[in-house]
Amino acid sequence: MSIVCIIPGPLKAFADGKSDVVLNVPVHTVGEALNILWERYPGLKDRVITEQGKVREHINIFAGDENIKYTGGFNTPLKSEIEIYIIPAVSGGIN
Amino acid sequence: MQTSGQISPRTGNVLLMIGTMKGVFLLSSNSTRSRWKVSGPHFTGQVVYALAYDGRAGKQRIWASPQSWFYGTVLAHSDDFGSNWSVPETANVKFPEDTGLSLKQIWQIEPGRDDEPDVLYCGVEPASLFKSTDAGETWSLVRGLHDHPHRPRWEPGGGGLCLHTILLHPTDRNKMYVAISTGGVYKTDDGGSTWRAVNKGVSAEFLPDKYPEFGQCVHKVAMHTSQPDRLFLQNHGGLFRSFNGGESWESMANGVPSDFGFPIVSHPHEPDTFYIVPLDYEMRCVPEAKLQVYRTQDAGKTWKPLTRGLPQKRAYETILRDSMTADQLDPAGIYFGTRSGKIYGSANNGNSWKLILDDLPPVTCVKAAVVGGEIQTKKSTSKKKTGTKRATKKPARATRKGK
């Protein structure tokens, strides 16, 4: 099973400079995959989710092409080969 | 965007720290304060509402609270005037899980008293106080305030539900004040274990009860450390003073064109002298588009405009609550930044002003410090050993201006 987590540019510094991280471990959900990512790179966790465990307001997480907001959140099931994208949302216009 | 410039202030130089909607700018000057070196932006694209200089125990540390629109906020620090920043890998200020709250913004960073050099406080949104006792390595929620029964009824103002003011009694470790918008002023007499609202006489024009126990939209409170039981408050409508440690307040809106505004700043050496920038209540810009700082030199009995060097037409300027400050020199430097990205400074107690910097992003925060050691004054022929001082804190007694 190969899950690839795509890291946004500003956060690469907290993932040893990597823009993608391959997780070669069995996981069943997005939440399980991200927990492994957080363990490997703790600096990513606080920047992607709040201290209450919710995805930050202006970040989207996709499993493949699907925003996990609409597919079960962290419980979104994963296929054997898939990319998880952490992407800053389209935000701005007031600053 | 690349960070440009580098500052290396020497002992006795003034450090000016500017937070904006798009990053931090650091300026330094010698004691004449006529020419400034500029470095920045640091934390490009991030909002910075809080900055502080910690010169205690030999440190030369700048604290900043960069907030990414996407990735949250942390407290970062630099020990070399911005050449390098220490950004924690994991968030160093965060709410415990049981609170159900998430940190939105850090609004204030306040180093502790001089004799407790590892203590720092920060005020945050949603309104809460955090404390560090290990020089900022770890932070804890001050539960005594967080658990206050008033907290569920505090309401966010336009800037959010923020704890924006932290005032420490300079000698009594048990006593301190915080101010919350909107919540009002709260005081502890037991080192933060318990807190009580101290807003008697402070108005809340936006509530049916115009003088409630709490719920006032306090914009900023100032104290002169030589007289710590006297507090001076810029309200969301109203200027107030207390001569009894906040137990009661009275209006001091005498002769100002508007009693609305955000900052209020203490003169470093004159305990009766404070500065404000009145704003038109509706437009939230300076009245009649004339940029005027108002100064009282008699503890709020009278206020007089300071206009020399400031634009007196078409100046549609807004100055936010932490965008005004003072340095520790004599005569004192007074500085403020505008939402249109201008930095004005006075090197003579506010008597005259110069535009220091223009075309910055909207200014959210201005703080000043004198880098430690010997401070030279214009009026003093001798050099005075003062130690490193933070802005708007201790008076530099040895260089106090005579009357």
Image (tube, coloured by chain):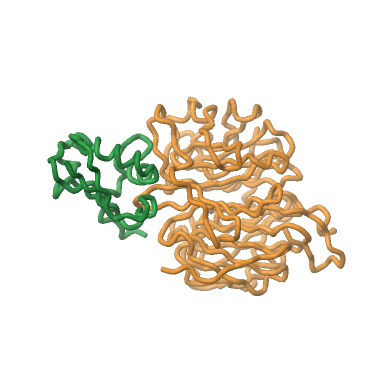
Q: Residue visible at 65% across and 32% down?
A: B247
- Residue B143 rendering spot, x and y as whole percentages: 52, 28
Q: Quadrant of residue B31?
A: bottom right
Location of residue A16 in the rendering, given as x and y in whole percent from the top left corner = 37, 52
The residue lying toward the viewer, choosing from B138 and B402, is B138
Above or below, comparing residue B197 to residue B311 in the picture: above
Name the image quarter holding the N terminus of chain B: bottom left
Is B208 on the left-hand or right-hand side of B188? left
User: Quick one: B90 or B41, which is closer to the camera?
Assistant: B90
**Residue beneath the point at 42% across and 30% down:** B152
Q: Is residue B329 above or below residue B272?
A: below
Residue that sits furthest to the right in the current view = B382
* Residue found at x 51% / y 63%: B338
Q: Residue at x 67, y 74 (%)?
A: B34
Q: Nearer the viewer, residue B249 or B96?
A: B96
Residue B157 in sight from this viewpoint = no
In x, y percent, where is residue B69? 36, 53
- Chain with colour green in the figure: A
Kindly tell me whether residue B224 is visible in this rendering.
Answer: yes
Q: Quadrant of the C terminus of chain B?
A: bottom right
Residue B247 lies, with reference to residue B340, above or below; the image says above
Report the side of B401 relative to B185 (left or right).
right
**What colour do you see for chain B?**
orange
Q: Left of B389 or right of it: where is A89?
A: left
